[in-house]
Amino acid sequence: MTDADVPGAREVVVGVGAGAAGFDHERGGGGPGSSIATTDMVLNVGPQHPATHGVLRLRLTLDGERVVACEPIVGYMHRGVEKLFEVRDYRQIIVLANRHDWLSAFSSELGVVMAVEHMLGMEVPERAVWLRTMLAELNRVLNHLMFLGSYPLEIGAITPMFYAFRERETIQEVMEEVSGGRMHYMFNRVGGLKEDVPAGWTGRVRAAVAAVRSRMPQIEDLVLGNEIFRARTRGIGYLSPELVHAYGVSGPIARASGVDLDLRRDEPYLAYGTLADEGVLEVVTRTEGDSYARYCCLVDQVRVSLALVDACLAHLEDLPPGPVGVRLPKIVKAPEGSTYVWTENPLGLNGYYLVSRGEKTPWRLKLRSASFNNVAVLPHVLTGCVVADMVAVLGSMFFVVGDIDK
Amino acid sequence: MRVPGRGLLTGLAVTWRAMTRRSVTQHYPEVAPDLPPRSRGVIALQEENCTSCMLCARECPAWCISIDSHQEVEPATTEGGRDRSHSVLDSFDIDFSLCMYCSICIEVCPFDALHWSPEFEYAETDIRDLTHGRDRLREWMWTVPPPQPLDPHAVDPKELDAARKAAEADDASGTGP
């Protein structure tokens, strides 16, 4: 049967595309469109594409508007960071470690130095521990604000970006004042921090946190209640807890699917144990597992992180004056052996497996980055979506391409 | 039951309120940004302090520093004394197209010859022009801000401790001013 045989079929094909068959079937019809033979089309999204924020390539197989298969092709930004780690001493590794995920630089640095400290059995001064906790949480807020702005942008709302960036700038300023960098802080050292904070800085952090907290409802009002945003994201891109476990998905995405795992509470490092006992550290979870739930998780995590920063500030006030670092020998050598340290990075679990043969460089430093696993699950989440929802799902997986490709 | 379109109106109310406030845009080329003293803008060189020991060039993870120097011999000033040799800096270049702004060179410098300056306006149209020699690095030295005082909960920097000890030693021996 050809198109010409059926009156009216022509309009359907022109209007919806070759996938009209699929749509017609969904509408419960065995109507004219349902009998048209269709051919799958392969569509490459990326590697350079405005909707993928980075060089991620998706090889989509489309049946009309439906995605029937999806294959993320990664590696366009592979810099061989694990190999580079092997020819650098531990201070130089920090330089590289804060670059694979450029939105969570501080937290990634933290993993490296904690691994080395663990190998050396080094005790970090209490003041450094609290400062690190606070800076890691500020970094988390910065990271989440980026996605809170960019995700609506990806599905067509440009306004929230400006609000998110205003808040980012407020926090960026205090981060820049303390570390000198806006992105690659380079503020961690084995045994503590590079230097102590400037006078009056804690007051400015408190003011920045209060300002961001007071303005967060604006982003929520702009986005969360918006009917268009809800229509584009609710029930879209469902990620089941089974898939989360199967693919090792972690971070806010996993928690939005009801997987209640947060290393800050479950395997406390830094000062998170105390903060959890005090009840400040609240693990945000959702059960819906769709794009909307993932976005809501980020919004609530910002709120929790800001509360954590305030709690850290209060603890820092009570601490006696003390150093923020351990005096190190000229050459730091991790003793022979191996260790695995993982941290709850803003985007998920970030692990460093450090093997040392007693040299000043590691024998092997394996990096487990969150985005890689979070993107690996995409074929399952995207299959069955329509092309227009592809971006809504992709954006809600909250990844950084540098963190995928390493 | 939600009123349809209410979410949109709430959002519009936010933008309406924002419209009545002053914008937060920085007017960069007209108004210079107010950067904190620790800002890592560019590396400045205090040439007199440099002993061309090459520590910075060796520790740099990007190998972006190149130093050339030669030895000069100072004849002995006293009879039977030894000739003294010291190295003289010929060239000191930093390739800012490679620099990762990690501040390791500044940290390892034992004689405080390198400093961070918040200066950032040195963009070039040719990547080769991003290599800056000792003269340019020295010009930036005059833009290096004094370090900020530290938090009252911080311990004093080791330089301050050393200076205090030296002063005390002077007092004890009675040779001080």
Image: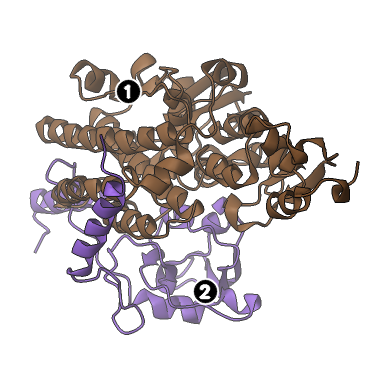
Q: Is residue A87 left or right of residue A265?
A: right
Going by the numbered disc 2, the residue's amino acid type is Pro
Observer-side mark, 1 or 2, equals: 1
**In the depicted structure, whether residue B18 falls above or below residue A223:** below
The residue at which mark 1 appears reads as A283
Asked whether A242 or B117 is in front, the reply is A242
Q: Is residue A156 above or below residue A342?
A: below
The picture quadrant where one finds residue A372 is top right
Q: Which residue is mark 2?
A: B75
- Tell me whether marks 1 and 2 sit on the same chain: no
Mark 1 falls within which chain?
A: A
> How far is the residue under mark 1 from the one under mark 2?
73 Å
Task: Identify the residue shown where x is 18% and y is 19%.
Answer: A278
| Closer to us: A362 or A147 | A147
| Kind of element beneath mark 1 | loop
Q: Is residue A171 left or right of residue A379?
A: left
Query: Chain A is shown in which shade?
Result: brown
Q: Position of residue B46 (x, y in %)?
A: 40, 71
Residue type of the residue flagged with mark 1: Val
Quadrant position of the N terminus of chain A in the picture: top right
**Left or right: A125 as drawn, with respect to A298:** left
Q: Is residue A88 visible?
A: yes
The local crowd at label 1, few if under 14, some if 14 to 19, many if 20 or more residues have their Cα within 10 Å, is: some
